[in-house]
Amino acid sequence: MRHTLASLVVAASLLSVASSEASAWVCRAVGIGSGGYGRSFSVIDAKLIALRRCENYSPIPVCTICGVGPAAEVARKQRARLRRPVSR
């Protein structure tokens, strides 16, 4: 009984750590002449938000998901891209 309780405590703590790492998702959708970002705690909601925003501003409402990731990782990649010097 003690081992079962201990394993449940360990599993609950691991789940709480794993869920806090990717608590928000960012998704990007692109179309003809437009693009859109969606951000949500759910991956599916982030995709739908990005598609809706892309289709609302597109002359032809056909958009495709081109990127999905945890919000912290996407922000880190964008900051790294902004710091990169432009070569001419």
Image (cartoon, grey):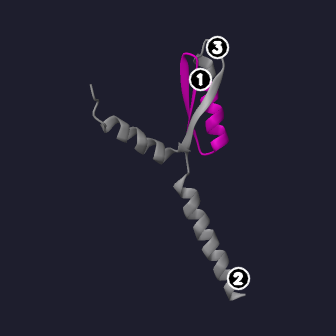
Using residue 83 as the reference point, say whether residue 63 is left or right of it: right
Compared to residue 5, the image places residue 51 above or below, namely above
**What is the quadrant of residue 6 in the picture?**
bottom right
Closest to the observer: 62 or 43?
A: 62
| Spatial CA span between label 3 and label 2 | 57 Å
Q: Give the range drawn in magenta.
A: 26-53
Circle 1 residues within 10 Å: few <14, some 14–19, many ≥20: many
Q: Residue under circle 2? A: 4
Circle 2 residues within 10 Å: few <14, some 14–19, many ≥20: few
The image position of residue 20, as x and y in percent, is: 54, 57
Amino acid type, residue under disc 1 in the picture: Cys
**Residue at (55% x, 27% y) in the render:** 36
Q: Of discs 3 and 1, which sits in the foreground?
A: 3
**Residue at (60% x, 45% y) in the render:** 41
Q: Which residue of the protein is positioned furthest toward the front in this rendering?
A: 88
Using residue 69 as the reference point, say whether residue 52 is left or right of it: right
Compared to residue 87, the image places residue 77 above or below, namely below
The image position of residue 38, as x and y in percent, is: 57, 34
Mark 1, secondary structure of its residue:
helix
| Spatial CA span between label 2 and label 1 | 49 Å
Circle 3 residues within 10 Å: few <14, some 14–19, many ≥20: few
Q: Residue under circle 3? A: 60
Amino acid type, residue under disc 2 in the picture: Thr
Residues at circles 2 and 1 in contact by the CB criterion of under 8 Å: no
> Which badge, 3 or 1, is on the more N-terminal residue?
1
Q: Residue under circle 1? A: 54
Mark 2, secondary structure of its residue:
helix
